[in-house]
Amino acid sequence: MEVPKWYVDDNKPWFTSGLWQEGVPKHPEFPVISMGDWFDERTETNAKNKAIWFSKTFMNYRVLRKHTDSLATSLAKLGIKKGDVVALLIPNCFQYTISYFAIVKLGAIVAPINPTYKPIEILHVLKEVKAKALICMDAMYGLIKPIQDQHKFDFIISTNIVDLVAIPGPIRDKMIKEGTIPSGDVPGALDFKELANKRGEVDIPEVKIDPLNDTAVYLMTGGTTGVPKAAIITHYNCVTNAKQTFLWMPDATHPMACIGILPMFHAFGQTIVQNVVLEGGDYNILFPRPPSSLKEVVDTILEVGPEGGVILPGVENLFIGLTRYLQENPEPRLKGMFRLCVSGAGALHRPVKDKFVAI
């Protein structure tokens, strides 16, 4: 398959203004590869590297690959095939990334759902993308229950937020009973933990995927209409976006850690928090919801951030808040830790940038 080639005029202002970062290629070429093959390549290369930190637990790339292949095998046996849509109603956690890559390995399509949506809004998404199955956080099932009669799934897979966290069973059960760990009952659902921990040979069907044209993800966007529609993201889109962003760190020391506050159901979080990290063999520090305070963010970076530094993706308000917090609570151990900061979903005004850089 021929690799697409683009040419951007070297006289463009972003090249001639002196702002283009040294070491970043101007005309890169990218391989035409499916997300499943890319995932396998990166997890094999970085098998011993940490992949995700969540709720005081690390998971390396070897274990991430094992769970993903097990779930992909299970989904295939449940009838998921190329072109089918599997909806995800899961916050940032191990299960999100495992589910995401298990689905695309089969040539099926990931349809992330914003958990802040109301049931009627979720129903619109499900009908828009024609979701065949749902992988759902048990505590979020209350968003599905009121509309389940109006959209029939072939099956639902349920998971608890700490299913893959290193907590002894009796302690976990006690915390769920006490309400310390959120949970919920999902009638008739299949158990995620069981499906992602299958023993025996991996049996993922061979699927012919055209990375340039086959859809990997449906991301909902309202644009200017206010009515969410499914934006089509191909395998090539996802892989290329990750590789493009990675090129902006030519002098980085890996592994690094990405501060995963942005939700991965969003395009920004999908690309920077999840996929760029995979490309670099780095690891995610995942927050299932926005942190209760910026102190929590700083303390977490100091606790589990690597010597290679951190990637900090966020919106402008995060950089404003973090600047103010560090001005009031100086932390010299953070000096030099922020290796790549990415602002999106709106403008990053120069005064905000300059104040953040100054700290």
Image (spheres, rainbow, N blue to C red):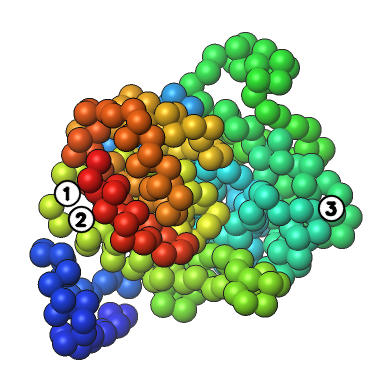
Locate the N terminus by quadrant: bottom left
77 sits to left or right of 255: right
Q: Seen from this angle, which residue lies furthest right?
A: 149
> Which mark, by number, is residue 86?
none
The residues bearing labels 3 and 1 have C-alpha atoms spaced at a distance of 47 Å
Locate the C terminus by quadrant: top left
Image marks 3 and 2: residues in contact by CB distance under 8 Å: no
158 sits to left or right of 211: right
Residue closest to the eye, 331 or 224: 331
- In the image, residue 203 lies at what x, y percent? 50, 49
131 sits to left or right of 271: right
Image marks 3 and 1: residues in contact by CB distance under 8 Å: no
SS of the residue at dot 2? loop
Q: Residue at x 22, y 60 (%)?
A: 248
184 is higher (above) or lower (below) than 201: above
SS of the residue at dot 3? helix
- In the image, residue 250 lies at what x, y percent? 15, 57
> Which mark, by number, is residue 249?
2
Q: Which residue is mark 1?
A: 252
Badge count? 3
Which circle, 3 or 2, is nearer the viewer? 2
Residue type marked 3: Gln
- In the image, residue 95 lies at what x, y percent? 54, 41
Residue closest to the eye, 74 or 87: 87
Q: Which residue is mark 3?
A: 148
Residue closest to the eye, 100 or 229: 229
Q: Residue at x 64, y 63 (%)?
A: 85
Residue type marked 2: Met
Tell me which label, 3 or 2, sits earlier in the chain: 3
Image marks 2 and 1: residues in contact by CB distance under 8 Å: yes
